[in-house]
Image (spheres, rainbow, N blue to C red):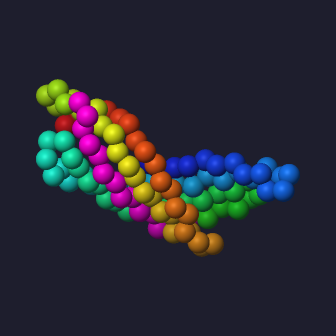
Amino acid sequence: FAGTNVSYDLGGVDYDQVAGFVGPSLQYWLSDKLNFEAGAGVGYWSGNTDEDNQGLGLILGAGFSVFNRGKHNLQVGVHYAPALTGPGTVHNFGFTFGYQFQ
């Protein structure tokens, strides 16, 4: 799961939208420290004025282990998760920090 929640001020009117990706992904480890990730699933976009769209969702990412102790990893990474919905593509970018057991 990857997603964004954004609020805009459109000429004095607040507008909120949620977009993202839900689905499986696979990791490929290039070394003990660096991995790449890719997956496909459902992309979604929803606005606060009853707009709601779904379509193909993708996720692409890379992670780097900043701390590794046995099977325990702390990672930093970047992800790009486009949601290819009816009105157009919503581009979701993120920086990640997480724990992984391998």
| Up/down of 79 relative to 74, above or below | below
Name the quarter where the C terminus is drawn: top left
Residue 13 visible to the viewer: yes
Residue 42 visible to the viewer: no
Q: Main structural element of the magenta stretch: helix, strand or loop?
A: strand
| Up/down of 90 relative to 76, above or below | below
* Residue 63 placement (x, y as % from top left): 29, 46
**What's the residue at 15%, 52% (across, down)?**
30
**What's the residue at 45%, 58% (across, down)?**
81
Q: How many marks?
A: 0
User: Which sits in the foreground, 42 or 90?
Assistant: 90
**What's the residue at 47%, 67% (across, down)?**
56
Q: Is residue 68 left or right of residue 45?
A: left
**What's the residue at 18%, 50% (across, down)?**
29
Q: Is residue 74 left or right of residue 44?
A: left
* Residue 92 placement (x, y as % from top left): 50, 56
| Up/down of 43 relative to 66, above or below | below
* Residue 53 placement (x, y as % from top left): 61, 64
Q: Is residue 12 magenta?
A: no
Q: Is residue 66 magenta?
A: yes
Question: Which residue in the rendered view is the most extreme toward the right?
Answer: 12
* Residue 6 placement (x, y as % from top left): 64, 49
Specify the segment rendered in magenta: 54-67
